[in-house]
Amino acid sequence: ELKVEQNPLFLSMQEGKNYTIYCNYSTTSDRLYWYRQDPGKSLESLFVLLSNGAVKQEGRLMASLDTKARLSTLHITAAVHDLSATYFCAVFPNTNAGKSTFGDGTTLTVKP
Amino acid sequence: NAGVTQTPKFRVLKTGQSMTLLCAQDMNHEYMYWYRQDPGMGLRLIHYSVGEGTTAKGEVPDGYNVSRLKKQNFLLGLESAAPSQTSVYFCASSYVTGDMNTEAFFGQGTRLTVV
């Protein structure tokens, strides 16, 4: 059974600070996805990481993938209030790619 | 281009009633998925489909049935609703390029309450 673990599950940050969210998974996968969800809303795709060593950046967020360690990170640089949301990582395994698994999410609160 | 559209957006059912949730996508995607999201939790995969006429069980399939008679539609059925099925249901779709499944695009969700 594929397991996807995110940590921390809750994160309260001051504006301007940096932090990293971690996503560990238990099976072989070359693909990992990060999503953002605002309260009461649907999921919005943030990053698609398709190979070992992939790094993608969008504004104050940067995501990376290490398939050997089965680890992805989402790094937040100089947090701002607008980044407050819940962030999910999701794995689509190499075999049976339809059977996706999501982490439990990291709820980020950025305080002034 | 509407993307992924779910119908209805809200519904209240009595225990034992049945209903069907409809998901429609206009992106010609091969894969479609149904998830449920419970408070404070991630998404759990109920059923998925890798193409028209095919369906497969996900992590939490019990109490649900699905059908994909047309490529653009993926229906989720509750035969006899139970309070434990109170949740927010999300449909998603994704496409395949080469041999790789790509990112999933999500509908707006259906908030279902079973009383």
Image: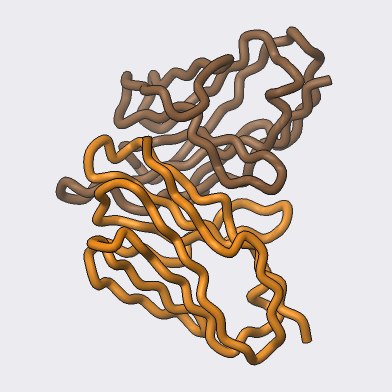
Chain colours: A orange, B brown
- Toward which corner of the image does residue A94 lie, by quadrant? top left
Residue drawn at point x = 78 percent, y = 28 percent: B113
Q: In this view, does B30 lie above or below A30?
A: above
* Rendered image quadrant of residue B5: top right
Residue A83 placement, left or right of A112: left
A72 with respect to B114 (left or right): left
Most distant residue in the right direction: B115
Location of residue A91 in the rendering, given as x and y in whole percent from the top left corner? 37, 50
x, y (%) of residue B85? 68, 24
Q: Which residue is rendered at x = 29% and y = 40% of the image?
A: A97
Q: In this view, does B17 lie to the left or right of B91?
A: right
Q: Where is residue A35 in the image (x, y as percent from the top left)?
A: 50, 60
Residue at position x 47%, y 57% in the image: A89
* Image spot of residue A95 (x, y percent): 22, 38
Q: Is residue A91 above or below residue B5?
A: below
Considering the image in quadrants, where does the C terminus of chain A appear? bottom right
Q: How many numbered marks have been drawn onto this rendered protein structure?
A: 0
Which of B77/A80 is in front? Answer: A80
Q: In this view, does B100 lie above or below B38?
A: below
Q: Nearer the viewer, residue B109 or B45?
A: B45
Is B92 placed left or right of B30 in the picture?
A: right
Residue in view at x 41 percent, y 23 percent: B57
Q: Quadrant of residue A86?
A: bottom right
Q: In this view, does A47 lie above or below A29?
A: below
Specify the quadrant that holds the N terminus of chain A: top left
